[in-house]
Image (cartoon, rainbow, N blue to C red):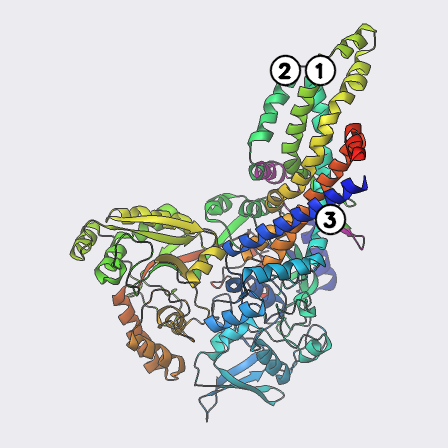
Amino acid sequence: MLAFLIQRVLQAIFVMFVVALIAFSLFHYVGDPVLNMLGQEATEADRDMLRSQLGLDQPVVVQFWQFIVNAAQFEFGISYRSARSVSELILERLPATLELATISAIFAVVMGIVLGIYTAIQRGNWLSKFIMTASLIGVSLPTFLIGILLIYLFAVELGWLPAFGRGEVVDLGWWNTGLLTGSGLRSLILPAITLGLFQLTLIMRLVRAEMLEVLRADYIKFARARGLSRRVVNLRHALKNTLIPVITIIGLQLGTIIAFAIITETVFQWPGVGALFITAVRFVDIPVMAAYLMMIALVFVIINLIVDLLYYAVDPRLRVQGGAK
Amino acid sequence: MFKKTVIASAVMMAMLATSAHAETLRWTRSADGLTLDPHSQNEGPTHALNHQIFDTLVYQDMDVEYQPGLATEWYVHEDDPKVWVFKIREGVTFHEGQALTADDVVFSLNRARHEHADMRGLLTSIAEVRAEDDFTVHVETHEPNPLLPNNLTNLFIMSRAWAEEHDVEEPQNFAAGEETHAVRNANGTGPFRVVSREPDVRTVLERNDDYWGIDHYPMEISELIYTPIESAATRVAALLSGEVDLLQETPVQDIERLANAEGLRNEQGAENRTIFLGMDVGSAELRSADTDDNPFADRRVREAIDLAVDQTTIQRAVMRGNSEPAGVIAPPFVNGYSEELDEVVPADLERANELMADAGYGDGFRVTLNCPNDRYVNDEQICQAVVSMLARIGITVDLVAQTRSVHFAELAREEYDFYMLGWGVPTMDSEYIFNYLYHTKDEDRGSWNFTGYSDERVDELTVDMASETDTESRNAMIAEAWEIVADEILYIPIHHQMLTWSMRDDIDFKVQSENTPHFKYLRFKD
């Protein structure tokens, strides 16, 4: 068990290192932060001075090494754009993104499973057909378009929900939440639907396909033959077996939801880390971009690690192999 | 919500019988100010926000006229043309109660000249700043500088005592890696004080009832809430749904829609920014062209391009009428601008093709045009139009449109043959244009002249016009310089950009050409 864990952690560290390296080599193609930082009246000498102050005149290898040394101590410097501590900026923005991601994930999972079951059981009826057709929209329309359409419908035309922002936020000291105020909850609805729609359709289609397959299995036929009610057969026998692959997918999609929040956050001016990243890219705010990419890499690495460990716990074959070593 | 505010304000007015309104204005634009530290960044949205909180000695009002701010008078010293005298307004206090004196002004100007301050670029002519008495400041320049007050319109005055108390005597040092107190806190003398600030999310300001100009300006807004919204569609939706009251940068495609929307109206005006194309005329060979010489070095080719680019078509088809076709790269209110200079060259393909043939490029050539795609209004679309216009005189243009940070970085590295640039003139004087765009590129001047153009006479005039104090001979220099460069056709002017602000129709406010609203002027219609 320990050997397995150490091996996985070492792999994770290696992945992080590679991500940092790729991120760093990309920074040279996004532009020159010094031009954004100094106004148009600055002379070439001013620009050179700032460049050397920031260490941007050093070779990439030296810059990279410096970054790795600092990152290992969770030290990401200050933002070129807003002059604020990067770790503080990210920690301040993280609650907004995590709340949005969690609510969308719950929305996607609950609605996905319910609709998946429904469309599998009621295969022929018109509502199922409608849901299946409508779900194509979730798969095929780009997120920003869905967001804008929702804004125009619910904010501009109907005036029911706010078009942007996070509403009123309650500060709990280490966390700020929009879940405790009316305007915070109302503000959450549209972005959560926008962000969760793709995952919802994915989960729904997966549940439906799995369910249809399971319903054809012999043990379901036997259960029916035993005279069990439809409800018990469908929900206890069939659903349970359907959920195993679904859980795996949900786990992996969670990271994607956090990463994909970038677009939703920009459309809704949601003050999360994704919007922070987009503004950073525009300004070539290297410290913020680097920290964000490392954070997203860390999220994926951790999720994968947990999934691996879960497999280890669930699948006895892995344990036997490990023990045999 | 709005109704409630109106009723509340009516009740309050009846109760207190005062003229002060209790109205909230919710303001949005695409980007937030970067910092509240008034000297560390030289950037439009940052100045626009700080103008509500701080004052400058001199400022440009809503008609971009120079007006007294914290200085009541300013003039060149009778005995020394290198010294500007500023009389400081008496009886002004900062938001936290400190009284303003000449010492605070000296401190602020020196702080802005610090090596970590971006504002220093505007103040390089200053040799020394000193307080003569409590309310008189002398600014001594290296050479006589007739434009000094024009350079101070975004130079905010801080309190020395406050800065010392909070250890922010120097502006933010990005290399030091620490946030200073002044980034998110401000103590100005301005019409509004900061109630709360979440950068990039929401900044709440309240009226400063002790403002020195409280009786001089309308000052009708009691609470100003600033929420930047980056996405253009969302910004417009927020105005349409009544979640904001004033939108500062209306996207061209939404102008008509907002004009027709109930309860909303648009205000338009010329912006202090001209859009143009630049050409590398100095290199022996172009980087991207398929020729082994430099076609742009031939004036006939440049004239042909000028004749082929049809500014009025761009105005109609690309800008939907929301621009002013240009014949010169100086915005209309700039000293030295004239209507003759700004006369648009009508498109003449026949003549253009003749010129191309005369220059030996009858079969045309191929070149790359570099444009930003998120900096100016419809920048990429303008370039696309130029591509098809130049195709008609045989020039095959490969368009590379990139995000602003990449475009300007590559431009600064002098990697471009043919590029788009927009230029605003904060000093309102042609000297600024010659200094940055026409003077030979060297250590001190010509930092945005990527054309490789170098002319001794223009350089001489540029340097002289910076220190000539006699208005008449100075204007003659400017006119001579314009004449020389107009004949060279280094830049192909496209248009003067227009600004559109959209607002609730009961708001009485107009567009400011620097894109800097002064909310103390805003009125609500009854």
Chain ID, mark 2: A
Q: Is residue B119 left or right of residue B183?
A: left
- Residue in the picture at 77% in, 28% down: A317
Chain ID, mark 1: A
Where is residue B123 shown, x and y percent of the image? 51, 77
Chain ID, mark 3: A
Of badges 1 and 2, nearer the viewer stands 1
Towards the viewer: A269 or A298: A298
Give the residue type at disc 1: Ile
Q: What residue would you read off at disc 3?
A: A95
Looking at the image, can residue B26 be seen? no
Check the image and name the residue furthest to the bottom: B79
Where is residue A232 shown, x and y percent of the image? 82, 15
- Residue in the picture at 54% in, 63% down: A59
Give the residue type at disc 3: Pro
- Residue in the picture at 61% in, 76% down: B157
Q: What residue would you read off at disc 1?
A: A121
First to last magenta residue range? A146-175
- Residue in the picture at 51% in, 67% down: A39
Image height of B83 relative to B346, above or below? below
Q: Give the quadrant of residue A65.
A: bottom right
